[in-house]
Image: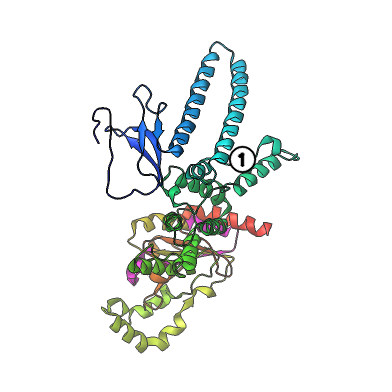
């Protein structure tokens, strides 16, 4: 909109969603915030000498209170800047002492002001916005006497975590249109909960979703936030959060109305593929063939079979010969099994496989470990020659008869793909570069000792 005779007028046929809005100028610079609530006929006045400070609202008490709240902070910032100027010429020690004393006074004044405003605005959107903005920290006066600094820090952390959502009204969809909601959720999960692991994330995520009325806009927003953040999470093991969301909200239709049918099908398909591969799950069984038996199978014609029908015919024609050749994954005895899926012509595999030889030889000196290297294609001679030339002294296996459907079973969309299994063949780590294997085994060893 253009300014005409000092006025800017916004009109529309449809009501805007309620929440906090802000005005920007034609250069996209932020001018001021205001509340849009039940009353959509708003009239604000100010002057350009100090546009934000001199704002007044005609016909909206809530906006007048909101502007007064903003002015309080502008006054405090100005006063604090003046105090900083007074420290010029002071020694570093004196200026630090002076500022610290004033900061305490300012903090107390701000805390009292916030408390009074929250009480006065209780039940109003402005009050809900303030609760979302304000974080609850334990006051020094309320701190119990504890033995040491570690106990005090732990108490403060737990207090902060346990009171983080106090007073926030998740039944108020207007909070979706504020500047603090996403920041607060990010901070809680990224800084407080994530370090505790995926199980803690799941517990806290369920609590937060329970605070949102079912099928509300708030519920949909928070649910999608979690789906986006955990569908392809960068930290190992956090795919468990995504699977939990799908099992407990998508499949049960608690998250109805968010995605169309095709998207729901794709989400469920992805989750069902990931679920058997979660940390702690038993590695899906594989029935594979080694290089010695591969020579025999290779002569049966599987590598030249063009269709699934011809592969099936070959398999049933040779089943009695092939069956005794299988080496099941579960038959490999070791405290640790590194299971790697790779391809001879994959550039990344060509870098990682020689590294794995070194890692394997070093780990063998310390622990009972085997490497099961599974070739994902069927070109026997190419595979065999590479094993010999690179001295890959692993348990080298492949699936020449296409019986395992391993690309689907192990979600192999790229290679190499690495899993670390324990002696029972449960997955303890996955999707790591080869040089991280020793570190992850060491972490697991420490866990075993603690348990």
- Where is mark 1, residue-wise? 137
In this picture, residue 114 sits left or right of residue 343: right
Between 108 and 420, the one nearer to me in the picture: 108
The single residue placed furthest to the top in the displayed view is: 89
Between 388 and 240, the one nearer to me in the picture: 240
Q: Position of residue 276 (x, y in %)?
A: 48, 69
Q: Which residues are magenta?
A: 357-386
From this view, report whether residue 172 is shown above or below residue 101. Answer: below
Q: Position of residue 209 (x, y in %)?
A: 51, 58
The single residue placed furthest to the front in the displayed view is: 59
Confirm whether residue 384 shows in the render. no
Q: Residue 27's image quarter? A: top left
Q: Secondary structure at mark 1?
A: loop
Q: Is residue 279 magenta?
A: no
Q: Is residue 360 magenta?
A: yes
From this view, report whether residue 276 is shown above or below residue 447. Answer: below
User: Which quadrant does the C terminus fall into?
Assistant: bottom right
């Amino acid at each position: 909109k253009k300014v005409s005779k000092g006025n800017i007028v916004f009109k529309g046929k449809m009501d805007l969603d309620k929440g906090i809005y802000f005005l920007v100028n034609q250069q996209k610079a932020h001018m001021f915030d205001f509340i849009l609530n039940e009353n959509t006929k708003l009239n604000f006045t100010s002057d350009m000498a100090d546009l934000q400070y001199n704002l007044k609202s005609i016909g909206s008490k809530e906006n007048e209170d909101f502007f007064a709240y903003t002015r309080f902070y502008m006054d405090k910032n100005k006063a604090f800047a003046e105090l900083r100027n007074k420290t010029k010429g002071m020694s570093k020690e004196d200026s630090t002492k002076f500022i610290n004393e004033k900061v305490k006074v300012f903090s107390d004044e701000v805390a009292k002001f916030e408390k009074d405003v929250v009480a006065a605005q209780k039940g109003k959107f402005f009050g809900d916005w303030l609760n979302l903005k304000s974080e609850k920290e334990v006051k020094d006066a309320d701190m119990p006497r504890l033995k040491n600094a570690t106990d005090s820090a732990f108490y403060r952390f737990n207090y902060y975590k346990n009171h983080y959502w106090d007073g926030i009204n998740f039944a108020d969809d207007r909070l979706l249109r504020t500047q603090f909601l996403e920041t607060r959720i990010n901070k809680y999960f990224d800084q407080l909960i994530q370090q505790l692991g995926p199980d803690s994330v799941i517990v806290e995520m369920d609590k937060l979703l329970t605070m949102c009325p079912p099928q509300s806009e708030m519920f949909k927003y928070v649910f999608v936030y979690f789906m986006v953040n955990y569908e392809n999470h960068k930290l190992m093991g956090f795919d468990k959060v995504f699977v939990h969301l799908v099992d407990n909200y998508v499949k049960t239709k608690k998250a109805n109305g968010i995605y169309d049918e095709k998207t729901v099908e794709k989400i469920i398909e992805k989750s069902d593929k990931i679920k058997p591969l979660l940390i702690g799950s038993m590695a899906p069984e594989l029935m594979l063939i080694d290089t010695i038996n591969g020579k025999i199978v290779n002569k049966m014609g599987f590598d030249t079979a063009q269709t699934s029908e011809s592969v099936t015919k070959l398999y049933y024609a040779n089943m009695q010969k092939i069956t005794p050749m299988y080496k099941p994954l579960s038959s490999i005895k070791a405290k640790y099994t590194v299971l790697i899926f790779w391809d001879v012509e994959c550039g990344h595999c060509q870098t990682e496989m020689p590294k794995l030889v070194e890692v394997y030889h070093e780990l063998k000196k310390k622990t009972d470990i085997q490497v099961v290297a599974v070739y994902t294609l069927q070109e026997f001679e190419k595979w065999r020659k590479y094993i010999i030339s690179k001295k890959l002294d692993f348990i080298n296996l492949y699936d020449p008869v296409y019986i395992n459907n391993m690309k689907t079973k192990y979600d192999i969309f790229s290679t190499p793909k690495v899993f670390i299994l324990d002696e029972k063949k449960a997955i303890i780590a996955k999707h790591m570069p080869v040089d991280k294997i020793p570190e992850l085994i060491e972490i697991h060893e420490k866990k075993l000792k603690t348990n």
